[in-house]
Amino acid sequence: MKHVTLPNGERVPALGMGTWNMGDDRATRAEEIATLRLGLDLGLRLIDTAEMYGEGLSESLIGEAIAGRRDEVFLVSKVYPHNASRRGIAAACERSLRRLGTDWLDLYLLHWRGDVPFEDTLEGLQALQRDGKIRQYGVSNLDLSDMDEWWDTPGGDQTAVNQLLYNLSRRGIEWDVLPWLRERRVPVMAYSPIEQARLVRHPKLVRFAQESGMTPAQVALAWLLANDDIIAIPKTGHRDRLRENIGALSHTLTAEQLATLDSIFPPPKGPRALEML
Ligand code: NAP
């Protein structure tokens, strides 16, 4: 397994497991749980979830999948912006912990910016950290100006990651927020790394993948994994696709292949509003 180093020196897997929409449908539940367990067996120890996903259904499913294996997992969850006040975040975290069947989260993220002042959210996160309920905290969907403001709020400079939409077809962050985070050694956790499966059907990527002896999903993930400071969290509820996605780790893209991908998916030529899904 390739690893990424967080600002506190902790190493986490560069490839983890997303869980949006997992737990929504009883018919697919058993395969989803089997997929998460197989992922742990194969080294994908990082699991990303949020209180928003199925309004707790995803966290409950993960709780079942990791029962008896908590110590193997680097568990990430996210708080709704409207719950991110000092008192609200304590209650929201408690509900997430109960659903996940654990006493602590490894990383707790503000899901996106809402109306609660950053100061209150950061006080709440630091209180949770002092109480041992969360080990680290971070943010998601913060653009450059939000990130600047967050960083200048007391405790903001202890941020472990910014979880952002980032994949071959969504490269806007390379213009500003990614370099800003790099200067501060804050990794990006890239969400929707295969663009919610749309990249798998992209004709030019399909051709490139065939010529390279990879699948399109593997190319999309290998492109992210070519960086030392990007954590990719693809979601799949199928064991065969999980095995396929892990295969990305066996492929290192050459400089020539990276240049070809740049011509198919050009990097930004100027600032763009932060994209979200
Ligand atoms: P994604 O991981 O890019 O794509 C997931 C979709 O691709 C699913 O429909 C999955 O279907 C399919 N898939 C996975 N592997 C495949 C493969 N090898 N071949 C073909 N299809 C494949 O999109 P995402 O779920 O939006 O993003 C990943 C995770 O990031 C989420 O689950 C969530 O944890 C996180 N996220 C965070 C935010 C945020 O605001 N912070 C926003 C979006 C997502 P099956 O499951 O049926 O295989």
Image: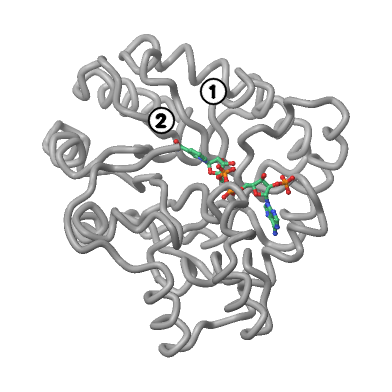
- Marks 1 and 2 close (CB-CB < 8 Å): yes
- Marks 1 and 2 sit apart, C-alpha to C-alpha, by 9 Å
Whether residue 132 is situated above or below residue 205 in the rendered picture? above
- Queried on whether the Cβ of the residue with tag 2 lies below 8 angstroms from ligand 1, the answer reads yes
Question: Front-most of 207 and 22?
Answer: 207
- Residue 124 picture location, percent across and down: 32, 20
Front-most of residues 266 and 250:
266
Q: Label 2 belongs to which residue?
A: 111
Query: Residue at coordinates 64% horizontally, 79% vertically from top-left?
Result: 250
Q: Which mark is residue 113?
A: none
Residue 118 at what x, y percent from top left? 22, 24
Regarding mark 2 in the picture, which secondary structure is present there? loop
Q: Residue at x 74, y 46 (%)?
A: 36
Q: In the figure, is residue 202 to the left or right of 191?
A: right
The structure residue drawn at horizontal position 55% and vertical position 52%, both measured from the top left corner, is 233
Would you call the spot at circle 1 few (<14 residues within 10 Å), some (14-19), or many (20 or more)? some
Residue 193 position, x and y percent, is 52, 55
Mark 1 or mark 2, earlier in chain: 1
Q: Amino acid at mark 1?
A: Met
Label 2 packing within 10 angstroms: few (<14), some (14-19), many (20+): many
Type of amino acid under label 2: His
Is 140 on the left-hand or right-hand side of 17? left
Q: Residue at x 57, y 71 (%)?
A: 219
Numbered tag placed on residue 52 in the rendering: 1
Q: How is the image coloured?
A: one colour
Q: Is residue 101 left or right of residue 83?
A: right
